[in-house]
Amino acid sequence: MKIKTTKAPPTWYVPEFGGNRDAVEQFAVLITPMTVAEANAAQDARLRRVKAGANPADIARKIRDDAIISHVDAVEGIAGEDGTKVSNGAELVKLVGMASDASLSGLLDEIYGAIESQSKLSEGERKN
């Protein structure tokens, strides 16, 4: 059995959020998948915080935001209402945190789901 130890290359992801995939001008994020060690570290952090009595919703949000900051290398097509363009995961998390529309949290949830999904091997890759 061969175990792949090189990181998968980054890939562009176009979120469905708010009808984005049907829009004329779409926005997209460049995602670098997590390694096994990074996924395990996130799980360990979640368990430590739960044991410490932290609010589960706060824990999930922190892990989501940390993953987006670490694994979204580029953003295209998103800007603040003042026209300032968002260029990476850290700026995206900051912008959504300042937004008056709480539903934008769903965008971050979707992007985090894409990071997790892209970090798992496909069935074909598992067989090889």
Image (cartoon, rainbow, N blue to C red):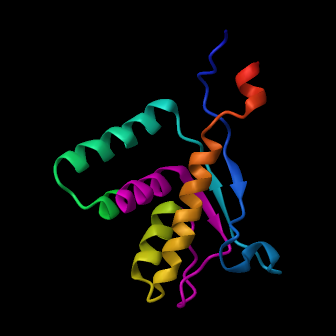
Q: Nearer the viewer, residue 3 or 47?
A: 47
Q: Is residue 53 magenta?
A: no
Q: Nearer the viewer, residue 1 or 84?
A: 1
Residue 22 lies, in percent from the top left, at 81, 77
Image quadrant occupied by the N terminus: top right
**Residue at image x 41%, y 34%?**
40
Question: In the picture provided, is 72 more to the left or to the right than 99?
Answer: right
Q: Nearer the viewer, residue 93 or 39?
A: 39
Q: Is residue 73 magenta?
A: yes
Question: In the picture provided, is 76 more to the left or to the right than 64?
Answer: right
Image quadrant occupied by the C terminus: top right
Seen in the picture, residue 100 relative to 85 is either above or below; the reply is below
Residue 5 lies, in percent from the top left, at 59, 22
Q: Residue furthest left?
A: 52
**Number of marks drawn:** 0
Q: Residue furthest top?
A: 1
**Residue at image x 38%, y 58%?**
60
Q: Which region is colored magenta?
A: 60-88
Residue 53 lies, in percent from the top left, at 17, 54
**Residue at image x 38%, y 41%?**
43
Question: In the picture provided, is 83 more to the left or to the right than 102?
Answer: right
**Residue at image x 46%, y 77%?**
95
Residue 111 lies, in percent from the top left, at 58, 60
